[in-house]
Amino acid sequence: MRDHTVCLLKECDSGCKMALDSMAQIKGYVSDQKLKNTIDGYEKKHQAMEEEAYKQLKSLGEGGKEPEMMAAAFSRMSTGMKMLMKDDNRQAAKILMDGCNMGIQSICGFRNQYAGASRESMDLADCLIRTEEALRDEMKAYL
């Protein structure tokens, strides 16, 4: 159980960090104040979940997990290129939706892979999935 819990928490931690990095990068291109406010709200939610993952990991004597360097670099480069080609709120919403879909798939996969994890870590993974789904759904208004 402990191994599954640690692995799931590390993936949640990494996923939150990746989402936070993407939202920070996207906000630089957003001109619509309502969209910026929405992103700000989801940044706070992701920060809270990242802090919870770290707290749970720390209680187990473990540390957090940084996103894979190549994945993070590719994400930054891809986002920058897409925004340079079409710098508008619609494009920003599409990129965020794509990121949410990848995050949902990733965390759902890890949740299934580490099915023996603690209830608290499973709850955090479920919260992250629901948050990504909600952000994705809110971005539909900007398409």
Image (cartoon, rainbow, N blue to C red):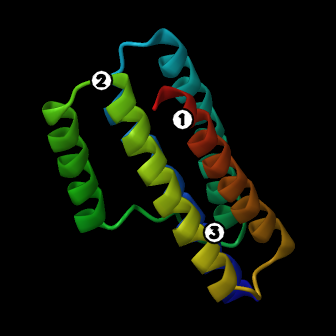
Q: What label does residue 39 carry, if any?
A: none
- The amino acid marked with disc number 1 is Met
Q: Which residue is mark 2?
A: 88
Circle 2: element type:
loop
In the rendered image, residue 91, in percent from the top left (x then y), is placed at: 33, 34
Residue lying furthest right: 119
Residue for badge 3: 9
Percent coordinates x, y for residue 111 in the rendering = 67, 77
Labels 3, 1: front one: 1
Q: Residue 129 lies in what quarter of the image? A: bottom right
Q: Position of residue 33 (x, y in %)?
A: 48, 10
Mark sitting on residue 139: 1
**Which one is earlier in the sequence, the residue at label 3 or at label 1?**
3
Amino acid carrying label 3: it is Leu
Q: Which residue is painted at 72% across and 53% down in the image?
A: 130
Q: Secondary structure at mark 1?
A: helix
Answer with mark 3 or mark 2, whichever residue precedes in sequence. Answer: 3
Q: Is residue 100 visible?
A: yes
Relative vertical location of residue 143 with respect to residue 55 in this rendering, above or below: above
